[in-house]
Image (cartoon, grey):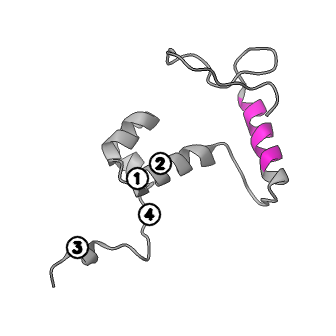
Amino acid sequence: MAGAAITEGERRDDEAVFRSQKGGALVPSQVWRIVRAAAKRAGISGHVSPHWFRHSHASHALERGASVALVRDTLGHSSLAVTSMYTHARPTESSALHLAI
C-alpha cells in the first residue's frame, strides 16, 4: 500500500487513519481498489470488500472475549442487535458445554 502511512499519537475522530499519496484522506473508491488488488495478490477470488476488515475485527474480538458492548462502541453501532450479527455459532462451542448435566 504505497503512500499510506500510520502515525502514532492522539487523533481526532474525524481524521483519516490512512492517507493517500498526496496526503489527503483516501476516498472510498481508492480503498476498494486497494482491497481488491490485495485480494488478487493473495489469490483470493470472489467478492471482497473493505467491510471484511470491520467484520473480521468484530468477529475476532468477540471470539477472544471482548464484550459485545465494547465491540458495539468501537465500531460505532447504534445497538447491540447490529453488533450481535457478528457472533457466529461455532461447532466446537456451545452454551450446552457450560451446563452441569
Left or right of residue 26: residue 73: left
Q: Dot 2 surroundings within 10 Å: few (below 14), some, or many (20 or more)?
A: many
Q: Disc count in the image? A: 4
Q: Do the residues labelled 1 and 4 touch (CB within 8 Å)?
A: no
Q: Quadrant of the C terminus?
A: bottom left
The answer to which quarter of the image holds residue 96 is bottom left
Amino acid under label 2?
Answer: Ala
- Position of residue 58 measured from the top left corner of the image (x, y, whole percent): 47, 48
Q: Which residue is label 3 attached to?
A: 98
Given residues 3 and 29, the one toward you in this image is 3
Q: Which mark is residue 58?
A: 2
Is residue 11 part of the magenta span, yes or no?
no
Main secondary structure of the magenta stretch: helix
Q: Which mark is residue 88?
A: 4
Residues rendered magenta in the picture: 28-38
Left or right of residue 62: residue 34: right
Q: Which residue is drawn at 33% across and 74% down?
A: 94
In the rendered image, the vertical position of residue 6 relative to residue 88, given as above or below: above
* Secondary structure state at the residue bearing disc 4: loop
Q: Do the residues labelled 1 and 2 touch (CB within 8 Å)?
A: yes
Amino acid under label 1?
Answer: Leu
Q: Residue at x 62, y 20 (%)?
A: 7
Amino acid under label 3?
Answer: His
